[in-house]
Amino acid sequence: MSSGLTDLLKTGFSMFMKVSRPHPSDHPLLILFVVGGITVSEAKMVKDLVASLKPGAQVILLSTRLLKPLNIPELLFATDRLHPDLGF
């Protein structure tokens, strides 16, 4: 966040000069949200992948649901997945 005229000028001049700007991948925290659910093995794969590609990075993995392996065929072959039960 810019605070003041000096920061505003620095931001404006950075378009014309080679100034390295911070990039989201520079941050040591990765927040990943999975819609629909994730299994424990998938969560471990994410953890291992991030640890191998960017050591020292912290991962926060969020999901709408923690799935069991037996839930996957049910979700794949459900006939009413486009019309969820809304409780009406």
Image (tube, rainbow, N blue to C red):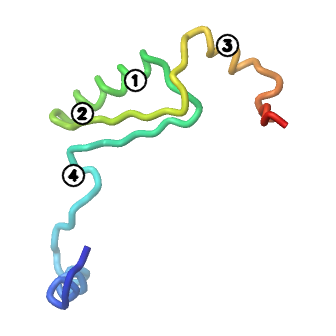
The secondary element bearing badge 2 is classed as: helix
The secondary element bearing badge 4 is classed as: helix
Instruction: State yes or no: discs 3 and 2 in contact (Cβ < 8 Å).
Output: no
Disc with the residue nearer the chain's start (2 vs 1)? 1
Disc 1: CA contacts within 10 A as few (<14), some (14-19) or many (>=20): some
Please name the residue that numbered disc 1 is placed on. 43
The secondary element bearing badge 1 is classed as: helix
Residue at 49 percent of width and 33 percent of height: 63
Please name the residue that numbered disc 4 is placed on. 26
Amino acid tagged 3: Pro
Quadrant housing the C terminus? top right
Amino acid tagged 1: Ala
Q: Is residue 63 above or below residue 21?
A: above
How far apart marks 2 and 1 lie (CA) works out to 16 Å
How far apart marks 4 and 3 lie (CA) works out to 38 Å
Q: State the count of labels.
A: 4
Amino acid tagged 2: Leu
The picture places residue 28, in percent across and down from the top left corner, at 20, 44
